[in-house]
């Protein structure tokens, strides 16, 4: 018997109606998602809770746009053009928070290294954090979110190598170098969560501010915003030529509540090629511990793990 003719095989092609409909649907989903991300990005210019939330999400909006662009190149190339708008807006929004470059220190430059960490109250880890920070060789150590027990533990740990210190409320500073003019600051609140001291560094005096901004909860951030505005007012009235402000600001890098501080001081960019995320320490997602300076050159800025805190410490080397 003769063999039966083979039945024709029907294969889908990239030009088939089904494939075109699938790509069109994917393109619409990508475009709509890109629009949602754009709205989130624009939020960083809106003061208040919207700006605070948008600032925390901003770095991850960039990651989302990267994923959307990759999918668009595979499924719906024309949509890539639509994504250009949110990408450009994201670049504009993230630019002030991008990594910087360390300044070279000319021969004979006087330097001071300052480390700062939120040690998490009632965690029992202040002594370990203090020991790790001291081992870094820093000249000045600033700790925030201290309770009575953690302050006592840190004092015992640092007393030998850091003979100069000052503490008030939930903040404290220790220094190898002499300090003077110690002041407690309320920054608009009814209790003390900030301080100012003058550190006698080689060749120059430096006004060092340490602050622990009030916490932020959904819809409740007035106290934090008052403190961030207060620190800007304090440094604006400060006649010191060299100023550094460190601590836990409870605000992501692009938070509009930091605008007042940025107008008075230079925000210290990480110089280690990262965005300098500090919280949570186990998997850092945002930089809420900051360093601001005036009249000082940034020779290096990075982060380090110290103790069992849920914050990484900031490590900043400054030159005169």
Image: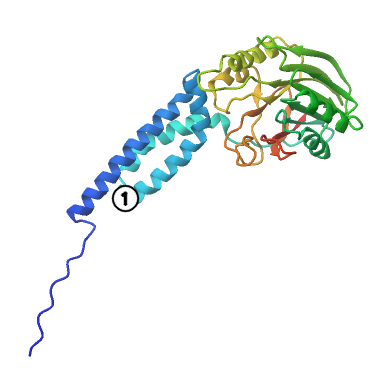
**Residue depicted at x 29% and y 43%:** 27
Q: Is residue 143 above or below residue 271?
A: above
Quadrant where the C terminus sits is top right
Asked if residue 250 can be seen in this view, the reply is yes
Q: Position of residue 283 (x, y in %)?
A: 60, 41
Q: Outermost residue, left direction? A: 1
Q: Quadrant of residue 189?
A: top right
**Residue depicted at x 40% and y 31%:** 38
Asked if residue 320 can be seen in this view, the reply is no
Q: Position of residue 197 (x, y in %)?
A: 80, 17
Camera-side residue of 150 and 75: 150
Q: Is residue 161 left or right of residue 117?
A: right
**Residue depicted at x 25% and y 45%:** 24
The residue that label 1 is drawn on is 75
Q: Is residue 240 left or right of residue 61?
A: right
Q: Position of residue 272 (x, y in %)?
A: 66, 41
Camera-side residue of 195 and 129: 129
Q: Is residue 236 above or below residue 99?
A: above
Camera-side residue of 122 and 205: 122
Q: Is residue 28 left or right of residue 222?
A: left
Q: Residues within 10 Å of mark 1 (few under 14, many from 20)?
A: some
**Residue depicted at x 30% and y 47%:** 76
Q: Quadrant of residue 236?
A: top right
Camera-side residue of 273 and 13: 13
Quadrant where the N terminus sits is bottom left
Q: Is residue 279 left or right of residue 300?
A: left
Identify the colour scheme used. rainbow
User: Mark 1: which secondary structure?
Assistant: helix
How many numbered circles does the render carry? 1
Q: Quadrant of residue 163?
A: top right
């Amino acid at each position: 018997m003769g063999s039966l003719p083979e039945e024709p095989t029907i294969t889908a092609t990239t030009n088939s109606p089904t494939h075109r409909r699938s790509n069109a649907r994917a393109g619409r989903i990508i475009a709509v998602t890109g629009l949602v991300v754009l709205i989130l990005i624009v939020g960083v210019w809106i003061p208040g809770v919207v700006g605070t939330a948008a600032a925390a999400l901003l770095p991850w909006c960039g990651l989302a746009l990267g994923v959307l662009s990759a999918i668009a190149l595979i499924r719906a190339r024309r949509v890539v053009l639509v994504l250009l708008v949110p990408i450009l807006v994201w670049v504009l929004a993230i630019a002030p928070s991008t990594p910087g470059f360390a300044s070279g220190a000319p021969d004979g430059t006087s330097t001071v290294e300052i480390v700062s960490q939120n040690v998490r109250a009632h965690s029992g880890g202040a002594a370990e954090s203090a020991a790790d920070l001291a081992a870094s060789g820093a000249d000045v150590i600033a700790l925030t979110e201290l309770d009575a027990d953690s302050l006592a533990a840190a004092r015992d740990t640092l007393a030998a190598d850091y003979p100069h210190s000052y503490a008030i409320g939930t903040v404290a500073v220790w220094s190898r170098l002499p300090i003077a003019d110690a002041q407690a600051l309320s920054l608009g609140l009814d209790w003390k969560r900030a301080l100012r001291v003058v550190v006698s560094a080689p060749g120059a005096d430096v006004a060092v501010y340490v602050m622990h901004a009030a916490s932020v909860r959904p819809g409740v951030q007035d106290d934090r915003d008052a403190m961030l505005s207060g620190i800007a007012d304090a440094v604006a009235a400060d006649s010191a030529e060299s100023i550094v402000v460190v601590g836990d600001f409870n605000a992501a890098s692009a938070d509009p509540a930091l605008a007042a501080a940025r107008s008075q001081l230079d925000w210290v960019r990480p110089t280690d090629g990262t965005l300098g995320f500090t919280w949570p320490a186990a998997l850092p997602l945002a930089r809420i511990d900051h360093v601001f300076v005036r009249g000082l050159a940034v020779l290096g800025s990075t982060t380090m793990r110290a103790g069992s805190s849920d914050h990484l410490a900031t490590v900043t080397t400054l030159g005169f």
